[in-house]
Image (cartoon, helix red, strand yellow):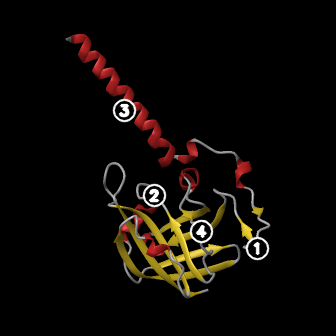
């Protein structure tokens, strides 16, 4: 009976250590640096114009009321999202016409979204330009609801994260924040 207890204890310890290591990759990305060569800007010869490699820093996003600032990277792959919130490839960059979509993990970067209110500002600093957006809608949707990703008239930004914020395992819903450009 004692050997069963020791075996179970060691098995649980090993499982906990593996879970801790796995979680460290997303919560502490600076402990696991990736090659700097992946952060090179590349021009795609296709008619749609400039493309960025996944993980390349594109712009800064700040939520002044929450006193928070992020560097947004290109792409929504796991590797890109370990670096910061990710710009959805194919959506316009902030400041351009359409719906710029940015996704982030609820348990790291975008946990602050739980505290945003309608009317709050979102600021974008890109190269030598600054854009101010004002939040006009906050909602919880199904992950299958792609309406929030669609192109819109005007200049909008959509921030997306998983919901609920405090849940173990995969979250069943998505928390969506919409904002309109108010000044450049």
Task: Give the quadrant of the N terminus.
Answer: top left
Whole-percent x, y for residue 175 in the image: 38, 68
Mark 2 vs 4, N-terminal side: 4
Mark-to-mark CA distance, 2 and 4:
17 Å
Whole-percent x, y for residue 11 in the image: 34, 23
Mark-to-mark CA distance, 2 and 1:
32 Å
Whole-percent x, y for residue 23 in the image: 44, 43
Residue 73 shown left or right of residue 180 in the figure:
right
Which image quadrant is residue 140 in?
bottom left
Which image quadrant is residue 10 in?
top left
Marks 2 and 1 in Cβ contact (< 8 Å): no
Mark 3 vs 4, N-terminal side: 3
Mark 2 vs 3, N-terminal side: 3
Give the labeled residue for mark 2.
Answer: 105
Whole-percent x, y for residue 122 in the image: 50, 77
Count neighbours of disc 1 (C-alpha within 10 A) and say few if under 14, some if 14 to 19, many if 20 or more: few
> Visible in this render: residue 65?
no
Taking depth in this image into account, of 58 and 149 the one nearest to the observer is 149
Give the labeled residue for mark 4.
Answer: 60
Mark-to-mark CA distance, 3 and 4:
35 Å
Give the labeled residue for mark 1.
Answer: 47
Q: Can you say whether 51 is above or below 9 in the image?
A: below
Count neighbours of disc 3 (C-alpha within 10 A) and say few if under 14, some if 14 to 19, many if 20 or more: few
Give the labeled residue for mark 3.
Answer: 16
Q: Secondary structure at mark 1?
A: loop
Mark 1 vs 4, N-terminal side: 1
């Amino acid at each position: 009976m004692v050997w069963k207890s020791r075996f179970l204890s060691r098995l649980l310890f090993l499982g906990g250590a593996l879970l801790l290591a796995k979680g460290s990759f997303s919560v502490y990305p600076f402990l696991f640096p990736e090659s700097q060569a992946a952060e090179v800007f590349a021009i795609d010869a296709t008619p749609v114009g400039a493309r960025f490699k996944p993980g390349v820093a594109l712009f800064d996003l700040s939520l002044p009321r929450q006193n928070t600032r992020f560097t947004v990277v290109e792409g929504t792959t796991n590797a890109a999202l370990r670096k910061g919130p990710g710009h959805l490839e194919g959506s316009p960059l902030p400041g351009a016409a359409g719906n710029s979509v940015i996704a982030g993990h609820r348990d790291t970067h975008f946990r602050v979204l739980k505290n945003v209110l309608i009317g709050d500002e979102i600021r974008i600093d890109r190269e030598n330009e600054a854009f101010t957006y004002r939040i006009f809608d906050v909602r919880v949707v199904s992950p299958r609801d792609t309406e929030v990703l669609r192109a819109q008239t005007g200049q909008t930004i959509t921030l997306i994260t998983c919901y609920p914020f405090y849940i173990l395992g995969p979250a069943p819903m998505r928390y969506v924040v919409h904002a309109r450009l108010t000044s450049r």
